Image: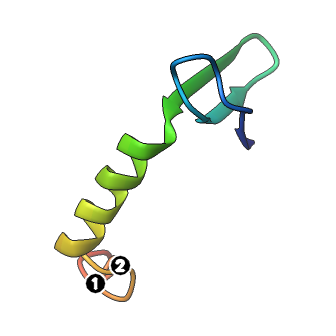
Amino acid sequence: MTYVTPPQSGRGRLSGLLLESEEVEVRFEVPIAPLAEWLNATYRITSAEAEMDGLD
């Protein structure tokens, strides 16, 4: 499950990922601006069209 939080004081909006199992749950929260920059950088290296080219 992914989610976006409302702006936090001084932290801006956060993007989150929640992973759950029967025994445990873990939540990752990352500021949206650096996440977007990282995703854009990875897309420049490998586009969505070429992403699966090296897999069987």
Quarter of the image with the C terminus is bottom left
Q: Quadrant of the N terminus?
A: top right
Q: Nearer the viewer, residue 27 or 33?
A: 33
> The residue under label 1 is which amino acid type?
Asp
In this picture, is 8 found above or below 31?
above
Q: Is residue 45 left or right of residue 10?
A: left
In space, the residues marked 1 and 2 are separated at their CA atoms by: 4 Å
Circle 2 residue: 52
Numbered disc total: 2
Residue located 32% across and 64% down the image: 40
- Percent of width and height locating residue 28: 56, 25
Tell me the tag on residue 53: 1
> Is the residue under label 2 in contact with that under label 1 (CB below 8 Å)?
yes
**Tag 2's secondary structure?**
loop
**Residue with the most extreme left position:** 45
Is 28 on the left-hand or right-hand side of 49? right
Q: Quadrant of residue 25?
A: top right
| Residue that sits furthest to the front in the current view | 10
What residue is shown at x 36% (from left), y 57% (from top)?
Answer: 39
Where disc 1 sits, the SS reads loop
